[in-house]
Amino acid sequence: MAVIGKKRPHIRKDHRQTEPVLRLTIANKAFETIDWGFGGFRLRGVNGKIKHGDEITVTRITPPGTNGTPVNVKVSVIRYNPVKKELSCEIPVLGEKAYEIFESILMRRYQDQS
């Protein structure tokens, strides 16, 4: 199996959610989350030349059944598995708007802000 990135022990400081599945938009394409939390996320269905340390920008967070909310969240690639097409990213600075979105989803009070 070809996994690109560093393999290291679990050092996650936040709890990851598997539900609800969110859609995160990167480069005008929406990807579904495998898991997500305040410190990072994993996405499925990602193709491309991606390597550990790349910086990418999430431009929309979309919970199920909504139009989502535009954001501007810079994330760092931690790991990319081209066989499984899974991308793992760390969120160094979440930002107030994205934090409020994640918090409202967890508290089950999210409303579209598009």
Image: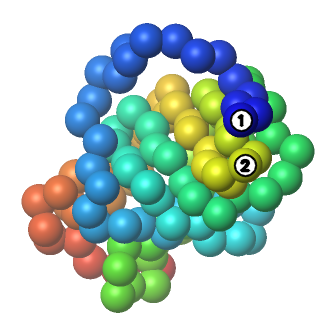
User: At which x and y percent is residue 42?
Assistant: 50, 47
Task: Out of 83 and 96, give the one closest to the viewer.
Answer: 83
Density class for disc 2 (Cα within 10 Å; few <14, some 14-19, many ≥20) is few
User: At which x and y percent is residue 103?
Assistant: 22, 52
Density class for disc 1 (Cα within 10 Å; few <14, some 14-19, many ≥20) is few
Give, as a three-letter code, the residue at label 1: Met
Q: Residue at x 51, y 66 (%)?
A: 32
- Residue position marked by numbered label 1 in the rendering: 1
Give, as a three-letter code, the residue at label 2: Val
User: At which x and y percent is residue 90?
Assistant: 52, 32
Question: What secondary structure is found at the residue carrying circle 1?
Answer: loop
State whether residue 81 appears in this view.
yes
Q: Residue at x 56, y 46 (%)?
A: 73
Q: Earlier in the sequence, mark 2 or mark 1?
A: 1
Query: As drawn, is 58 to the left or to the right of 83?
Result: left
- Residue position marked by numbered label 2 in the rendering: 83
Question: What secondary structure is found at the residue carrying circle 2?
Answer: loop
Q: CA distance from mark 2 to mark 1?
A: 7 Å
